[in-house]
Image (cartoon, grey):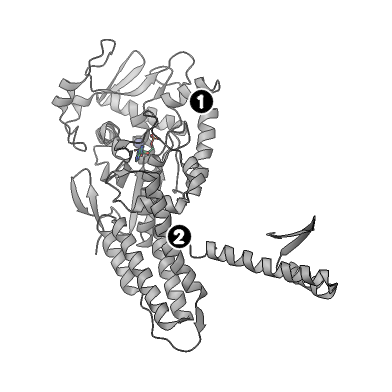
Amino acid sequence: MPIRFYNTLTKKLDEFQPLIPNKISMYMCGPTVYDYFHIGNARSFVMADIINRYFRYKRFEVKFVMNLTDIDDKIINKAIEEKTDTKTISGKYTRAFFEDIEKLKIKPADHYPKATDNVDGIIELISKLIESESAYQVNGDVFYDVKKFAEYGKLSGKKLEDLISGARVDVNEQKKNPVDFALWKSAKPDEPFWESPWGKGRPGWHVECSVMSMKNLGETFDIHAGGNDLIFPHHENEIAQSEAATHKPFAHYWIHFGFLNIDNQKMSKSLGNFFTLRDVLKKFSAEALRFLYCQTLYSAPLNFSDDLLRNSESALKRIKNTIHQIKTSLINDGSQEPFSTKEFYSDFVEVMDDNFNTPQALAVIFDLCKEINLFIAKHENLSNQNKEQMLNALQILGGDVLGILNVNEKTDHDEKLLNDLMNIIIDIRNDARKEKRFEVSDKIRDDLKKLNIELEDKKGQTTWKINRS
Ligand code: AMP
Ligand code: ZN
């Protein structure tokens, strides 16, 4: 069955037909690197990651590109605030971005183009637009002439007349039309700038994404994604610029992510109602956060609370309990009726194919856990083959696609069991030492060393550590 998902451009669930069979080109608007990202941004990054992982699971060859906006008013203001330059700010938060997405178990995109590495391409596109009279320059600024693009509004559903009549007219603006937007901004004193045919300046935000997406994926590509806040004007403007320059369709499919809200208000830096990912990960696991995101359809709003995250953590624990049960079940070397995971894979694919329905995908994983628990309770032990099938299914669906678990990771149970066992061994060794049975205490120490476990006796206390060299 083909995948279908909601396409903001056609405003309906479309069957997905990639330009080239089995290949997918996908672009996502990435962060403006001026601060640590918050869990609202993270929701968009994680849902794009799950879609990327799912396409790969379906054996598509995916080229996934996410840009980094590394020059922007926000970056300039932050540099002024911190009495430094924009490069220092964007460098610091680009590194933080990569650290954070790793913590969030996001599979890296195939390419992360930066706006400042693409200024030549941006100047080229703007020049083309000026040549074809889709853009005009005024005193070092270049604006896109929205009225020249007949299809303006096709993504957001907005009407140009309404936009013009509703626009705030700024008397200082030299634009032909209040809805025209900047492609190139002339440099203000002390701002970073690049030389251009229109003088010193820097690119506007919208044009950066047109250039970085087309350079990496071609003039027409499959999917463009981003948060709901970007539909208008950012994505509408990207379409206008790109299609006016190439006379070809830009992206065929547009995916937009719903907001993460707090008290039903969008989480955002400007409102100050945000939690950075770093802060949240001090209290909760990345898997729990991903689980929380998966509980809501990617396009719907999600009202965040700590309680919801606590619930996600306990729901995840239920899955981890099943994994622990499988791992600790006795092995039955004889034959055992096979445990079939096939229908769970097909149920999972059915719901994910239908608009990436992650809430339903979680339900399939819980059904699988329920069936596994019943099977183990009934049989009391597991054949190696059944054990492997169960762990594989949980790893592939919950681990590889949704990124909410890792069956190979030590569980809390494993950790506790190891601690308890070590305490027993240390007690036996201490008793042996008290009774001067040194051949026993030395043997314990030496044998543990062979397992890379080192004992340390200090102030009458024995501690242990695993040497991971
Ligand atoms: P920014 O760094 O603000 O440009 O945002 C980076 C990405 O996060 C963009 O795709 C935004 O649409 C998305 N985003 C920003 N705020 C939220 C939010 N509260 N919920 C979901 N996505 C968001
Ligand atoms: Zn963008």
Residue 149: name its quadrant. Answer: top left
> Which x, y percent locates residue 42?
41, 43
Residue 17: name its quadrant. Answer: bottom left
Residue 113: image tag: none
| Residue 74 at least partly seen | yes
- The residue beneath circle 1 is 86
> Which x, y percent locates residue 375?
39, 78
Lower position in the chain sequence, tag 1 or tag 2: 1
In the rendered image of this protein, does residue 403 appear above or below residue 177?
Answer: below
- The residue beneath circle 2 is 405
> Identity of the amino acid at label 2?
Leu
Q: Considering the numbered disc 1 on the image, is that residue within a helix, a strand or a loop? A: helix
Between the C-alphas of marks 1 and 2, the distance is 38 Å
Q: Considering the numbered disc 2 on the image, is that residue within a helix, a strand or a loop? A: loop
- For the residue pair 453 and 209, the one nearer the viewer reads as 453
Q: Residue at x 74, y 62 (%)?
A: 454
Q: Residue at x 48, y 65 (%)?
A: 407
